[in-house]
Image: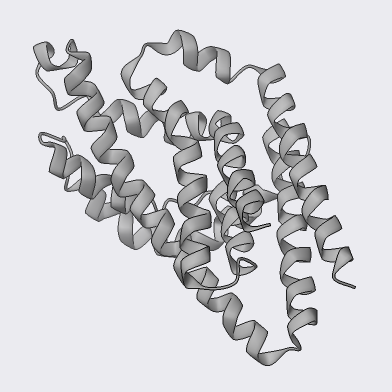
Amino acid sequence: METLSYLSAFMVGLLGGVHCLGMCGGITGTLNLGLEPKQRENVGTLLLFQLSYNAGRIFSYTLAGALMGGLGILLVQWLPLQTAQRVLLGFAGLFMVLLGLYLGGWWMLLNRVEQVGRGLWVRIEPLGRRLLPVKTPFQALLLGTLWGWLPCGLVYSMLINATASGGLINGALLMLAFAVGTLPNLLLMGVLTGAAAHLLQSKRVKQVSGLLVLGFGVWTLYRALLLG
């Protein structure tokens, strides 16, 4: 079951990449602005900077997953085990359904959820500005670590799932699987020109992705019902 959860998290990251292109596409493009013209023309150099940025972002997601997994353990201590599992899985499934509707463009309720993190982001964002323009891969790594805390409904919905994962390590691994799933789309956006990115942001692709994530949410809710 844990393997299926990690696979689902990876697939949500991959499918949710159509949203990542809108949220983080500008950031990945900004990384290239500090490079010399010859560096920008070198795919290997661009890939190095993009990998450094995404490594920092993945670290932040994994850390947040560990924290949320630990929070789930605290809830299990306050409630009977089976009740806690049903509550956590129920919330995880609900947020996954909302995420599917969000990605498909049918209901944008998760936009409001993103406002929860804006207070923290106001304090972090100025630190990121100091790292611009990015001149070295290490700067890109630091920037990615900071930008990993950007308010994002997609990330928040997966963090809710991390609370139901069963602990710090499981929560970290779940978010790691999710973060790796987001990687292909963001690397594509950072290294290639806008043609492929435009395709991924098409309405049809977003709707198909939303339906698939919606299916993962329904499956998670079904798992919660099976615990009854």
According to the image, what is the colour scheme of the structure? one colour
Q: Estimate the x, y position of residue 177 in percent, counting from the top left.
A: 50, 47
| Number of numbered discs visible in the structure rendering | 0
Q: Residue furthest bottom?
A: 78
From the viewer's perspective, tell me whether residue 157 is left or right of residue 187. Answer: right
Front-most of residues 179 and 140: 179
Q: Estimate the x, y position of residue 185 in percent, counting from the top left.
A: 47, 27
Rendered residue at 40%/22% (across/down) = 189
Q: Estimate the x, y position of residue 60 in percent, counting from the top left.
A: 37, 56
Q: Quadrant of the C terminus?
A: bottom right
Can residue 105 be seen in the rendering of this structure?
Answer: no
Q: Quadrant of the N terminus?
A: bottom right
Rendered residue at 54%/70% (across/down) = 69
Q: Estimate the x, y position of residue 28 in percent, counting from the top left.
A: 33, 30
Locate residue 223: give its quadrant.
Answer: bottom right
From the viewer's perspective, tell me whether residue 68 is left or right of residue 226. Answer: left
Can residue 31 be seen in the rendering of this structure?
Answer: yes
Rendered residue at 25%/46% (across/down) = 143
Locate residue 206: give its quadrant.
Answer: top right
Q: Is residue 43 above or below residue 68?
A: above
Front-most of residues 36 and 47: 47
Front-most of residues 121 and 49: 49
Q: Is residue 125 above or below residue 191?
A: below
